[in-house]
């Protein structure tokens, strides 16, 4: 019983860190993609919601 409660408590402590790490990795991928598009001379058009060539 105590082992289950301690395991549950540890999982509740670790989960936010894993979720933050996952979001950080997704942000890094998105930033790399944006830099790649910028290097190709593309920019983001907010009115159309897509990349456009300059």
Image: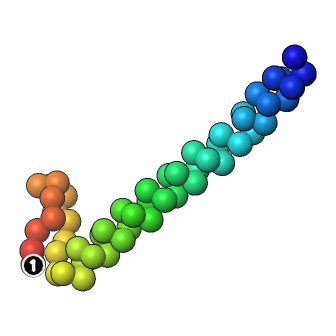
> Dividing the image into 4 quarters, which one contains the N terminus?
top right
The residue wearing badge 1 is 54
**Crowding at label 1, few (<14), some or many (≥20) Cα neighbours within 10 Å?**
few
In the image, taking residue 23 as reference, residue 32 lies left or right, namely left
The location of residue 38, given as percent across then percent down, is 24, 77
Question: Residue at point 39% right, 64% down?
Answer: 29
The answer to whether 30 is drawn above or below residue 9 in the figure is below
In the image, taking residue 20 as reference, residue 2 lies left or right, namely right
* Total numbered badges shown on the rendered structure: 1
Question: Residue at point 58% right, 54% down?
Answer: 21
* Closer to the camera in the image, 24 or 11: 11
Quarter of the rendering containing residue 11: top right
Question: Residue at point 78% right, 36% down?
Answer: 10
Q: Farthest residue in the top direction?
A: 1
* Closer to the camera in the image, 54 or 3: 3
The answer to whether 44 is drawn above or below residue 35 in the figure is above
Of helix, strand and loop, which one carries label 1? loop
In the image, taking residue 32 as reference, residue 42 lies left or right, namely left
The location of residue 22, given as percent across then percent down, is 52, 51
The location of residue 34, given as percent across then percent down, is 30, 69
Question: Residue at point 76% right, 28% down?
Answer: 8
């Amino acid at each position: 019983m105590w082992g289950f409660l301690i395991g549950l408590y540890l999982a509740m402590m670790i989960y936010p860190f894993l979720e933050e790490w996952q979001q950080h990795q997704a942000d890094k991928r998105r930033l790399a993609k944006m830099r790649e598009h910028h290097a190709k001379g593309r920019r983001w058009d907010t009115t159309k919601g897509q990349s456009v060539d300059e």
